[in-house]
Structure formats: structure tokens, C-alpha cells
Amino acid sequence: MALQSRRSEPVGNESLEDWKFIGAGGFGKVYKARHKDWGFDVAIKLIHHADGAVMSLCQEANHMDEAACPYVLRRCGIYEGYPPKGGPSMQRGIVMEFMGRGSIQTLQKDLSGPPPWPLAFRFAHHVALGMNFLHQKKILHQDLKPCNVLLNDDLNAKVADFGLSMVSTSALTSNTEMTGVVGGSYKYMPPESFDISYKPVRAFDVYSYGVLLWSILNGEEPYPAADRPRVELRIPMGDRPPCETIEQMEVEGLKDLIDLMKRCWNENPSERPTFECCREVTESVLSQHEKDVPGAVYQVLTQLASPQSHQHFNNNVVFRSAPRMRKQSNDTVDHPIRVKQNPVSVPTKNLTVADKAKFVDENRAVLIQSVSEVLAIAEELGDMVHPEAYSAIEAKTTSYGQMRVIYQKTLRSGGDVVKAAFYDALKKHHPRLVERPGG
């Protein structure tokens, strides 16, 4: 059976060189290759030989054509040929633009956590734009998750993988039924979809987007230790990924995004927002950080290019990537706040009280990440630390958690004098955090 689509001119082996295997899945395999005439790399998705596989590939190709926009992966053509080590029979596939930075999932692994806030907010907005466009075209994605959001060389995000996509029968409401079967990854599937009588609707994608937002903000997969039976049991009972850590972070617009996330994973599909509403919220949040996006992109690309990108932050050297820290008491994860690439370097001689306070304020995120001798510093501050605050510091099992208490319960309300005293104690216990290299 010939592969038919709206853009059916085939790409054959004579046009491709430098094949490299990228990965595989239930659908088949993905390769990277250079197109000789076009002069740039492409990704080639090849399907397994199975009944109905060619028709499914054709449908996926047509969905990609329908959804062509800057925030959805672009299809460049179709492939028909004999790929390297592909066996004696001809194979068919989709030729797509190559996204050189992998996916949000691979970025999370490379960074050992979440990206800087401005970049996280841009990811959230790009996905909302792409999904809104899909739904406007009456297409349901049905498998939205970090590995299906791909990143180009500039870390712009695009929605990808339309293997489970369906076409809606109507565009009247956000919950219009779709033709097809239920698919997706169970950790991103809404509670109603575990019912055997469920018929897919657009609210399915909205729920998945809510969980995807959580993953973007936290830098990890939800329910890391839960298998499918447990997820199928607990999600309909109201369980959702924990939000305590990010809810305590003071970042402009974050509260609005968390509120959107929770509305997206509402147990009632009719209460979930449309993607048009989602993009309005994400656009507003991103606008508050847009000026910082280029710096965040540069920070991440520099970190990815460094052979030391995974070194621990508590070595009192230039910060690269902070590891996640696990509490011993309840086995929950304490995530670090995103930080600047380097602490601000300031002279350490002849600083006024105001200068020291300014340093402590401007480097809050870096210091929370990097200071390990927290109890010793608290003791140096003496009566400046209220007994209740000191008890809260002692109760934390990570230096990250202890430092957050210092900022929240002591430095925030103590004024410049307390911040200056904190600076002096910091200089004593962590001199490299406040001194110029070699100074």
C-alpha cells in the first residue's frame, strides 16, 4: 500500500546521508540524517511492519500538515526506501525537522532538575500555543508529556508525536468527542479516561497539560515510583503530584501558573480551561520574564556544553547544576530554586551595611543553593534568630531547606543590620561565595 498524504512526494535514500540512530519506541525507530539537496539535518520516523501501520502513519502525516505552525513539529516529507540495517524490505516513514536539543525530558535529565524560571515559563507558553492551534484545527493530541515536547537549538519548544492524534467530529465545545481510541501515557491521563466506557474529548489534553506543567516546573516525572495499577487507582481518588515546594517559591507569575495547573487537572472535565485560556495565562506570566529568557537560554546551553555541568553545588565553586535533595523523614523531594549562572562578584573590603544587605538580597537564590554551614551561621547570628525560627531551621534535613527558613523567618524581617551580620558570618564560613577569585 502506498503512503498517501497531502504532501506525498517521497524522500529516498539517494537524498540522504550520515544516518544516525536516535531512538526507538512502540511505533518503530527514529533516525537523524542529512538531506543532501536541502543542506540541513532531518529526523526520520520509521514504522514497524504491522497491520494498519501505513494507514496510521498516513493519518499522522496529515495531522502534522493540518497543525503546521511555529509551535508544532513540522513535517518535511515522507520517506520510502531502505534505511541502514533496515533489512531487505522497503520501509516507509515521516521526514520531519530535526530538533537538535532533544526534548523537555532529556533536558531535565541533562540538568538534573528544572530549567531557569524564564525558560520554564517559555516552555509552558509554547506548548499552550501549540496545543491551542491543534484544538482550533479540531485535532486531539492525546499523548502530551515531556518526551513529546521537542527543543530546537535555541531551546524553543514544539509539540510533537501525533501517533495517537484524532480528529474531532465538531468544534463547538472544549469537550467535543473525538473519533478514535483512548491512548496516552498513564501518568498524564485524566481520571475519567481509566473508565472502559470513556470517549476521548479535548479535556483529555488539558489534563495532560496540567501534569506537564508540574513536570516542567519541578524538573522531574510525576509519581516516579508508581506503576500503572496504582496510578489508575489513586488518580480517580483525587491524588495529584505534590505542589508544596513550588508553592513556597516567590517568583513573579508562578502563583498564576500553579493555579492554571490545578485547574487543568480538575477531576471534572467541564471545569478545566480551554487552551485559549491557558495561552492567555502563560503569555501573561512569560511577559514578566521575557527580558530574562536570552540569559536563561545562554546559561543552559553553556551548562550543557560544560563537562562539569553535573557537579554538585555545595563545592563552593562556580554553580553548574544543583542535585535534588531528598528528605529522610517523609521521602519527599526538596527541589532547589533556579539560580544565576554565577554569584555576583563584589569586593569584600570597605563594604557598608547597605552594601552587604544588597549582596544578600541580590544573591538569594545562589546562597540558598550553595550554603551548607547553615546552623553554624545561625549560631553566629545569635539572638537575631528567633527561637522559633531556630527550631524551624533545625527541623529541616537539608541545607537548602534550612537556608529558605533563614531568608523567610530572619532576613526578610530583620532589616539591613541582620543581613549585614549574615554576610559577615557567610564570609567566615563560605569565603569563596563573597570574595572575588584570588581576592
Image: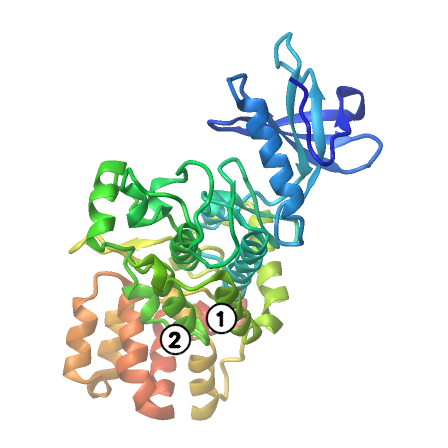
Q: Which mark's residue is nearer the viewer, 2 or 1?
A: 1
Q: Residues within 10 Å of mark 1 (few under 14, many from 20)?
A: some
Vertical placement of residue 124 versus 248, above or below:
above
Q: Residues within 10 Å of mark 2 (few under 14, many from 20)?
A: few
Quadrant assignment for the N terminus: top right
Instruction: Report whether residue 370 is seen.
Output: no
Residue drawn at the location 76% of the way across and 22% of the way down: 12
Return the residue nearer the eye: 312 or 347.
312
Q: Which of the 4 quarters of the picture holds residue 330?
A: bottom left
Colour scheme shown: rainbow
Residue 430's x, y, as percent?
38, 69
Distance CA(mark 2)–CA(mark 1): 18 Å
The mark found on residue 250 in the picture is 2
Residue drawn at the location 65% of the way across and 46% of the way down: 66
Q: Which residue is mark 1?
A: 281
Q: Looking at the picture, which amino acid does disc 1 mark? A: Val
The mark found on residue 308 in the picture is none
**Number of marks present in the image shown:** 2
Return the residue nearer the eye: 420 or 325.
325
Vertical placement of residue 7 versus 199, above or below:
above
Q: Looking at the picture, which amino acid does disc 2 mark? A: Glu
Return the residue nearer the eye: 417 or 207.
207
Q: Secondary structure at mark 2?
A: loop
Instruction: Report whether residue 131 is seen.
Output: yes
Q: Quick one: label 2 or label 1, which is nearer the N terminus?
A: 2
